[in-house]
Image (cartoon, rainbow, N blue to C red):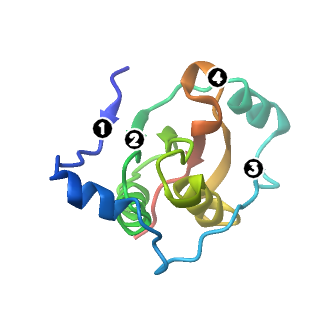
Amino acid sequence: MKLIEIEVPRYHSSYIQSLLEVDTSVDVRPGEASYRTESTPKQTFQALKNGKIVIDKRYSFRGMQVSEAEKALDDIMMNTQKASCYLLVHGKGIGSSKQQPKIKYLLQNKFYGHPQVIAYCEACASDGGSGAMYVMLSAYLR
């Protein structure tokens, strides 16, 4: 399956440097590393952790600011029309201020307990390991 990249335009190096500065508009802290709803069978969650669930789509958030990633994530969630499994590549945060994986923390905090989230966990090494996660979403109810 082809990785669907959320395009990030190329900018002048001074603009790129400004992106590496601290984003104080959003306070993002580490969240839960994995989660499943009580109604999600343990076998399903284990299959997700082992990378055995078919991935419907893959998205990359690498290089995005937290605010950009949050908007892209909202779009993904609102456009989920059936139960789906996604691979979300967020990166390891090496290029961010303080080398914190802010996008990873954003995803964890957004997903934990969200009514549309069935389960999420860190991806297998072959799919990005600690720089990516699997998430199972139910359909967005309008």
Q: Amino acid at mark 2?
A: Ser
The amino acid type found where label 1 is placed reads: Glu
Task: Find numbered disc 3 in the image and state the secondary structure of the residue it sits on.
Answer: loop
Q: Which residue is mark 4?
A: 125
Tag 4: Cα neighbours inside 10 Å, few (<14), some, or many (≥20)?
few
- Name the residue carrying label 1: 5
Q: Residue at x 63, y 32 (%)?
A: 123
Q: CB of mark 4 within 8 Å of CB of mark 2?
A: no
In the drawing, does residue 72 fall left or right of residue 136? left
Q: Please tell me which of labels 1 and 2 falls first in the chain.
A: 1
The local crowd at label 3, few if under 14, some if 14 to 19, many if 20 or more residues have their Cα within 10 Å, is some
Who's the residue at 73% across and 31% down the image?
49
Q: Are marks 1 and 2 in contact (CB under 8 Å)?
A: yes
Among the 4 quarters of the image, the one containing residue 6: top left
Left/right placement of residue 7 relative to residue 102 reads: left
Residue that numbered label 2 is attached to = 60
Mark 1 to mark 2 CA distance (whole Å): 5 Å
On the image, the x and y values in percent for residue 116 come to: 57, 61
Q: CA distance from mark 2 to mark 3?
A: 19 Å
Q: Earlier in the sequence, mark 4 or mark 1?
A: 1
- The residue wearing badge 3 is 33
Snapshot quadrant of residue 114 = bottom right
* Outermost bottom residue: 25
